[in-house]
Image (spheres, grey):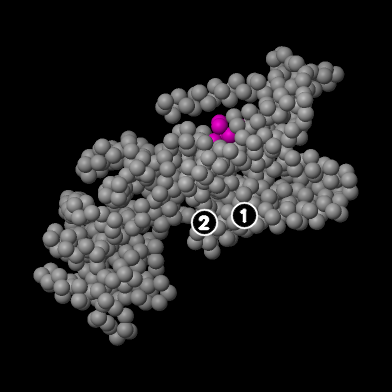
């Protein structure tokens, strides 16, 4: 199957799953409800409220989170030459979580709003991304960076535990719910900001295609091909921090997508061309998280399961398969 | 022509002093010496990966050491000793990466880039490998592909670090013969490090070596041209500790 056929097929499934995602849920809506809610919104209509304020934001953030985390995972895997690298394991998402915990559990009213949470999530991602970048200078073996990332994760978790013991019940409850991950925390009015920030990172990532292609040959080879390794790493970390910070702020920490999807995309497209891989990760990442969220919604009738449980249930066996395939 | 002026190479401290005056266009030269004597250091210094301790390296009268990475990429192609291990990379795509300095920011190849890659694949006789994954190649095939990638970079200087390192006798001869042919055809300057003295001698390739005994005032070994007809035993005595 040619690359363009695979893309067409992927987009067709994405459209189908998006429709399924919109219509999934306990309340049955018609297509006209979505259309009307966007162009002739009626505040007194329950269907309009469900369509515009719940279903549409949920669909868009699910697509953005799946695509963004997968692209971030791809960038990390290429610049650190490790198929297990991703924003979560390298501590970038952990940095976001820590800073969100610091703001939501601090009780300081200045930070108890959207801007405070988003700002702190982005700041945490940038700071922890910066720490990883500094370590790359001193690490000859890139695998040890994963260990540093895991250490950063444990360090952050310890700080969060300490803060939690001093938090009141309400703060603790809201933080615990946030940390389970959910696609239902975004409102319609927040969408323009989220879309603009996502598009910024998405467009920027395409400009990395050429240097990332060369970097699969190793730093020396890439450097001899005229690639500025330091700049490529820096821009990759910035994009990862944008995606990880944005998505962690609005959806909570989402596990395993950044690790599983880039590997899956390489298997599907059988290439290392990053233009193809970025597009592939956008589509497959969105498909992966849409599927997980549809499962969450379907079983929500019986019991509530956090999205992280589903992404891990699907992601972990696949990651184990990658590890066995690569290192056995 | 590459010319060396009072060049001393090394990592922080001088490891060897380069007493070769120049490397001419259309000439292939083998660099010999003991392990750790400075062969790779010399190649990396010419390639701009290491700064010289002293002295300068000029190409056609212009200093190489002051060039930007992008300019260097159009002047020098470097083949390191180790082949990069990567999944999902076909030979054609691997060779295509040699065109990186000529591509736009998105890394998309134009028709002329694809033609360059196809010509090199034909020239090196590796069409049967073109759609294979690089992870499925033998050591000999990998070295040929590395040379092809370096040629795709279309530079006047070609540097190779132990290209015959993992090859059997037949593949060594084949690779070095191809290198000698393309060097003459394309008027390149080719310098490669090796320990395969017999093959080099039988192919009449010129030699330079890191002298094991002859030292200068600063007590560092000299990298010198080796007399063409010097017997093999004497070369080993003089250039291997």
| Image spot of residue A230 (x, y percent) | 51, 56
Callout 2: chain: A
Task: Depth check: give the residue in front, B184 or A268.
Answer: A268
Q: Residue at the location (19% across, 65% down)? A: B197
Q: Dot 2 surroundings within 10 Å: few (below 14), some, or many (20 or more)?
A: some
| Image spot of residue A219 (x, y percent) | 44, 55
Residue A129 in view (yes/no):
no
| Residue at the limit of the structure toward the bottom, as seen here | B217
Q: Would you name the residue on which mark 2 appears?
A: A142
Callout 1: chain: A
Q: Residue at the location (60% across, 20% down)? A: A16
Q: Residue at the location (50% across, 44% down)? A: A324
Which numbered dot is residue B208?
none
Q: Find the magenta span and give its range.
A: A281-286
| Residue at the limit of the structure toward the front, as seen here | A328
Location of the N terminus of chain A (image quadrant) = top left
Q: Earlier in the sequence, mark 1 or mark 2?
A: 2
Task: For marks 1 and 2, give the CA distance.
Answer: 11 Å
Is residue B81 located in the magenta-colored stretch of the structure? no
Most frequent secondary structure within the magenta stretch? helix
| Image spot of residue B172 (x, y percent) | 21, 55
Q: Residue at the location (51% across, 49% down)? A: A82
Task: Depth check: give the residue in front, A277 or A193.
Answer: A277
Q: Would you name the residue on which mark 1 appears?
A: A149
């Amino acid at each position: 199957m040619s690359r363009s056929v695979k893309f067409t097929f992927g987009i067709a499934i994405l459209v189908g799953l998006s429709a399924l995602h919109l219509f999934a849920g306990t309340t049955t809506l018609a297509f006209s409800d979505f259309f009307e809610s966007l162009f002739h919104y009626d505040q007194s209509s329950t269907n309009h409220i469900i369509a515009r304020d719940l279903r549409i934001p949920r669909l868009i953030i699910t697509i953005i989170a799946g695509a963004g985390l997968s692209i971030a995972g791809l960038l990390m895997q290429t610049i650190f030459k490790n198929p297990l690298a991703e924003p979560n394991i390298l501590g970038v998402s952990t940095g976001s979580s820590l800073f969100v915990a610091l703001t939501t559990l601090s009780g300081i009213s200045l930070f108890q709003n959207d801007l405070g949470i988003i700002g702190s999530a982005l700041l945490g991602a940038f700071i922890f991304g910066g720490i990883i970048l500094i370590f790359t200078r001193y690490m000859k073996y890139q695998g040890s960076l994963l260990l540093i990332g895991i250490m950063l994760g444990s360090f952050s978790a310890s700080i969060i535990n300490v803060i939690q013991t001093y938090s009141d019940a309400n703060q603790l409850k809201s933080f615990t719910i946030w940390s389970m991950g959910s696609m239902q925390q975004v409102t319609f009015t927040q969408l323009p900001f989220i879309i603009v920030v996502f598009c910024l990172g998405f467009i920027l990532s395409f400009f990395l295609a050429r240097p990332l292609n060369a970097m699969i040959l190793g730093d020396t080879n890439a450097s001899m091909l005229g690639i500025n390794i330091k700049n490529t790493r820096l821009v990759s970390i910035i994009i990862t921090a944008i995606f990880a910070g944005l998505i962690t702020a609005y959806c909570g920490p989402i596990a395993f997508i950044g690790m599983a999807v880039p590997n899956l995309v390489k298997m599907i497209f059988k290439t290392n061309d990053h233009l193809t891989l970025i597009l592939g990760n956008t589509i497959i990442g969105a498909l992966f998280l849409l599927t997980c969220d549809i499962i969450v919604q379907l079983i929500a009738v019986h019991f509530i399961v956090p999205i992280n449980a589903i992404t891990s249930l699907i992601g972990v066996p696949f990651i184990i398969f990658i590890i066995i395939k690569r290192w056995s | 022509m590459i010319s060396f002026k009072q060049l001393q190479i090394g990592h922080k401290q001088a490891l060897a002093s380069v007493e070769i005056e120049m490397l001419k266009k259309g000439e292939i030269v083998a660099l010999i010496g003991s392990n750790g004597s400075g062969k790779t250091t010399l190649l990396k210094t010419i390639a701009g990966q290491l700064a010289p301790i002293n002295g300068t390296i000029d190409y056609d009268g212009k200093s190489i050491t002051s060039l930007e990475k992008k300019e260097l990429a159009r002047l020098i192609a470097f083949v390191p000793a180790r082949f990069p291990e990567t999944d999902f990379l076909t030979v054609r795509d691997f060779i295509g990466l040699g065109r990186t300095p000529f591509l736009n920011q998105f890394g998309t190849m134009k028709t002329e880039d694809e033609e360059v890659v196809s010509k090199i694949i034909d020239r090196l006789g590796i069409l049967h490998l073109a759609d294979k994954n690089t992870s499925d190649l033998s050591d000999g095939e990998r070295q040929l592909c590395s040379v092809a990638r370096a040629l795709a970079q279309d530079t006047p200087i070609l540097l190779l670090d132990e290209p015959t390192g993992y090859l059997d006798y037949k593949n060594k001869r084949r690779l070095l013969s191809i290198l000698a042919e393309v060097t003459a055809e394309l008027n390149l300057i080719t310098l490669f490090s090796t320990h395969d003295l017999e093959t080099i001698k039988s192919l009449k390739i010129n030699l330079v070596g890191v002298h094991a005994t002859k030292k200068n005032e600063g007590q560092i070994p000299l990298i010198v041209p080796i007399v063409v007809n010097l017997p093999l035993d004497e070369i080993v005595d003089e250039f291997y500790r």
